[in-house]
Amino acid sequence: MKKTKILSLVVVLVIALTVVLAACQPAAPTGDALADVKTAGKADIDNYAKNFTESDYTADGWTTLQKAVTDGKAAVDAATTAADVFTAVNNAKSAMDKVAKAPVSTQTYVSYGLVHGQGYVGKATVTIDANGVVTAAALDEACLPTYVTAADPVEGFTVADEVESHGAKVTKNFYKTVKFGGYTATYDVATHTYLIDGLPMLDRFASIVYARAWFESANTDSVVVVSDDKTEDGDVMNSATLLKTQNGYWGEPTAPALGWEENAVATSAFFVENYEAFVPAFYQNGPGNLFYGHSANGQPWFWNGVNTGATWTDMEDYITLLVVAYAQPSQSFAYGLVHGKGYVGEATIVRTQQGVIVSAGLEEACLPTYIAAEAAIVDVTTTDTAYPSHGSEVTKHFYTTVKFGGNTFTYSTTEHDYVMEGTTLKAWLEDEANAMVYFLSVSNDQVAIVNAEGEDDFTVMTSAKLLKSQNGYWSTPSGSQLGWKTNVEKTVEYVMNNGFVQDEFTTDNKVGNVFVDENGVSTGATWTDFNDYYQLLKKAYETQVSIGSFDYYIEAWKSHYGVQVAVTVEDGVITGLTMFNDAVTGWRQITPSFDPNGTYAAAQAEFIESLIGLSVEEVLDMPASFTVTSGTRVPSGSEGGVEAVGGNEIMTGATQSEARLLLAIWRALGYLNA
């Protein structure tokens, strides 16, 4: 009530000021009348100042604006006439208006990928301002190496091949060897395509790493063709011949179809105008279910009743690139004890940079105590006659020794748990890093028991027996309660629809076997420990830890090589990197006899440390590849067994080892498919 009275007084005083200034009176107000005019004038300045927001200005700009308010009110106080008050108020407003706002910062996001029937590498660029608003978008495409051929054979540079082109057989002179971005593409007549590190070009370009390398090499005129005698020519494949924005591709369309450039502009403009509604629909329905109206005669595509303005056949490809560039979806993981701290859970969240959850998932690994022998086995099991189980004491024959991730735990009948150096397994798993090691060991089938011969046996505690999604855990629910799989689906569905607005959930209230939080929120799930799973998913949403691996088997050496990593990224910068040991993965990072002096091992830690603080873009710029047939790395700048990555000599004596590490990182970051 008091505020209303004050506001009414201000309105009256403002009216009084207007009346006084407008009236043609021979004498200026004095005394109380002038004081009332001044009060109204200063209130007018304060009200006008409310139109300005501090976040729109730099610190200096905001200080200047506040000074305009202070100086204006001081001028009002010093005024001797109503006209002077009027002038002071207008001057203050003008001074506020003249303070320049801070320049709106923008961020540009880019995505690369195969488009147009997987025949070209596209690039989408989306510009977002400080308020998260898309202000611009653009598309470009780079033709593949097969697009540029020689009219006549060029000795040492080209090879002739009969290929199918638009339904007809033609002979073309393809350049034998093409180098770009640290990679080498070699034309293969048998498959009628270029091979990059042993795989067909299109398989490689399915990964953003390779697609990006090809496009940017073309864009910067750094693609070279190479002759048999190693002569390089950088004038054959360049931006003018490869980029559609420059080479005149589809420049003269037949109406009503638009040309390439007009379609790119129309598609980009459509995205800018409709992205807020379009992007959620894209993730919910997929690009192939969003458009209609296009036909072979060049009619435009429609979305949700809106004419996109584009007529090209592969509209979905280009929109996908734009959506990915805008959303920058990333996958993150979290690990921890759930369900009464009796199991290790893994939560997976895929979210856009705007915080929209694209997908979510839950998995659980049972602890080693989940698997016991039916009868005692000499030198293999330990019998616990008082094992607590659902409120009763039972007898179970647990495997005495369990190994995983380089750790050895022994069963204790006193602790009723596995113990390592005085620490129980459940206590050890309270650390998320340890929980992650255990879960990944289970996933990779690298949990072993020690058999009677003292050997590690990996056939007892396998992923098929320990992962709940595989071992049939709670597959037949009772009554109206849901089973494990359906509870996972209901929990994930709740999170997808509602995010993480709740701090936590309780399980005190239950309606129709569906748990209801104390705030009246029904999740649809019926498992008792809903909050455990909810908190684990929330942790995955709030953290940025991604898991990736790269492995392969070399028949000649009868060995499986590979690396698995956990990468933490904050604001586009790598802030954490863990490489799991061979005991977790079951693969070899390196053959022990290959590194007798520990050269690789010593350099490995230094190399990993050198990646911390680098941007994702910088890591993607490090060439890392090897041929599929031999596993031998073929990096840029490699000489005499000294491997060079990004110009830095690292891991002396190693061949493909650091390449596997980088490839695993790229997979973790979501940039490597093939």
Image (tube, helix red, strand yellow):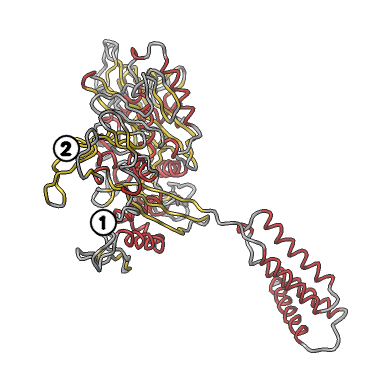
Q: What's the distance in space between the residues labelled 1 and 2, CA to CA?
A: 25 Å
Q: Is residue 115 above or below residue 338?
A: below
Q: Name the amino acid, label 2.
A: Thr
Earlier residue among tags 1 and 2:
2
Disc 2 crowd, CA 10 A, few/some/many (<14, 14-19, 20+): few
Residue 369 visible at all: no
Residue 371, quarter of the rendered image: top left
Mark 2 falls on what kind of element? loop
In percent of width and height, residue 193 lies at: 20, 39
**Tags 1 and 2 in contact by the CB under 8 Å rule?**
no
- The numbered dot on residue 191 is 2
Q: What residue sits 29% from the left and 11% below the top?
A: 454
Residue bearing the label numbered 1: 314
Q: What residue sits 76% from the left and 77% below the top?
A: 86
In percent of width and height, residue 325 lies at: 39, 50
Q: Compare residues 267 and 647 and report the one nearer the observer.
A: 647
Q: Compare residues 593 and 29 and report the one nearer the observer.
A: 593
Residue 625 visible at all: yes
In percent of width and height, residue 228 lies at: 25, 29
Disc 1 crowd, CA 10 A, few/some/many (<14, 14-19, 20+): few
Residue 401, quarter of the rendered image: top left
Q: What residue sits 30% from the left and 63% below the top?
A: 310
Q: Compare residues 85 and 257 and report the one nearer the observer.
A: 257
Quarter containing the C terminus: top left
